[in-house]
Amino acid sequence: MMMLVKCRYLRLCYNNIRSNRIANNYNSYNLNNRISFSSFGFSKQYENINQRRSFCNESTTPNYISNQEFQIKESEVRRIISLLVGGKHYQDKKQRLVLIENELKSNGVESQLSIDNKKAQTLKECQRLKRDIEQIEELQSNFMYYEEISGEAKKKNDQSMLSEMSECISDLYQQSTDLEFKSIMSGENDHEDCYLEIHAGAGGADSMDWSEILSNMYRKWSQRKDFKVTLVDISPGEVGYKRAILKIEGEFAYGWCRSESGVHKLIRLSPFDSSGKRHTSFASVLAYPAVDDSISIDLQTKDLLIETMRSSGPGGQHSNKTESAVRITHTPTGISVAVSDQRSQHQNKSIAMDLLKAKIMASEIKKRAQQEESFRSDLGVNGWASDRIVRTYTMHPQTRVKDQRTNLESLNIDEILEGGDELDIFIKTALSQK
């Protein structure tokens, strides 16, 4: 609600600046000498904008940011908007939205009442695309208003307005960085819930303990992000876990987690070695989307090639004289079935449809199994020979976490293992380079 107030306020000021430029009366920011903000939820009227209290902050104390901070945030917002609007994902979404809207209109879908599952999914995708496009266009529009107003405020050194603009650019900066990250998550399954499988690798008891530490790290991280996290399966070891599976549910859960797939290495003084030697342990993490297990087979008439022919099998003279045998081919997949056992064409067709659905479902199950297997094969070796090291967590002789893909480093290993903000930074950096 507050962001809406700011956006409408920015546009109000923008229109006022244009009018006052013509009248050469910018100094007062006067909107016909009186402004009512009751429509924004504020009942008080102000003789002049410079007299108003901050919309961005309940405090009357100005909250300034330095000129350097202004420039940095403005530059970042400008860069992100250029990236978003000029990017392939944005253009693809607009084209996809046009196609979906035309499809829905041609099918006569006006509401979500009495529609099949496939159309419901199409409507859901349409709504998501509209929301994504509107967010980018609103950011672009609001930043245009901001630049116009802040430019005038800087020229006139209007400290009251500059205070307001410092709040607004901070909000625009946050909004733009959020949208930039969201644009990274444009994969087919990024919006899905997620499973995280953690397996102990080379290192014996230390690796099983390390597997449990990683599980707890992701559990705490998920809870901090308000995701629902469930430990759905564990295989206990002598200590810790040989294997643990977490289900993480929430918006873009898989998008957040997919860059975590790979081998995580721990270097520390082993708590299980009485000689106090340094040990290296490994654990692999596999992230995959938690897609709906139910497979809906919706056979469209336009996708079916139905052929009838005379049966050559048993059934007497009737089956040989009439075209009772049926062959149905599903053209998108090329799967075909033929049935001729029954004397009636209607019976053969009904059985053929059931067989076709079963074959398509079996094909889809096999396809999903192959996809899951490809996820696992990408992990490589869960030990010293691994070429898929994601991060190295060092506790001795110094404390350090290093991402082997991005070269990002942090000395704050405790916060990372507690699922803190620094883990977000590692994840975002890895995603931005994919």
Image (cartoon, grey):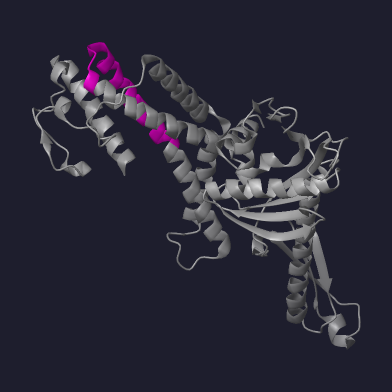
Q: Quadrant of residue 424?
A: top right
* Residue 48 visible within the image: yes
Indicate whether residue 146 is drawn in magenta. yes
- Out of 171 and 133, give the one closest to the viewer: 171
Q: Residue at x 47, y 22 (%)?
A: 76
In the rendered view of the protein, which quadrant contains the N terminus?
top left
Q: Seen from this angle, which residue lies furthest top?
A: 155
- Out of 357 and 238, give the one closest to the viewer: 238
- Out of 371 and 60, give the one closest to the viewer: 60
In the rendered view of the protein, which quadrant contains the C terminus?
top right
The relative height of residue 3 versus residue 83 in the rendered view (above or below) is below
> Total marks drawn?
0
- Out of 230 and 100, give the one closest to the viewer: 230
Q: Residue at x 59, y 34 (%)?
A: 428
Indicate whether residue 69 is drawn in magenta. no
For the record, the magenta segment spans 136-160
Q: Seen from this angle, which residue lies furthest right?
A: 313
Residue 301 location (% of width, % of height)? 65, 64
The relative height of residue 349 versus residue 424 in the rendered view (above or below) is below
Residue 239 location (% of width, % of height)? 79, 53
Residue 414 location (% of width, % of height)? 63, 37
Residue 333 location (% of width, % of height)? 76, 56
Left or right side of 269 for 57: left
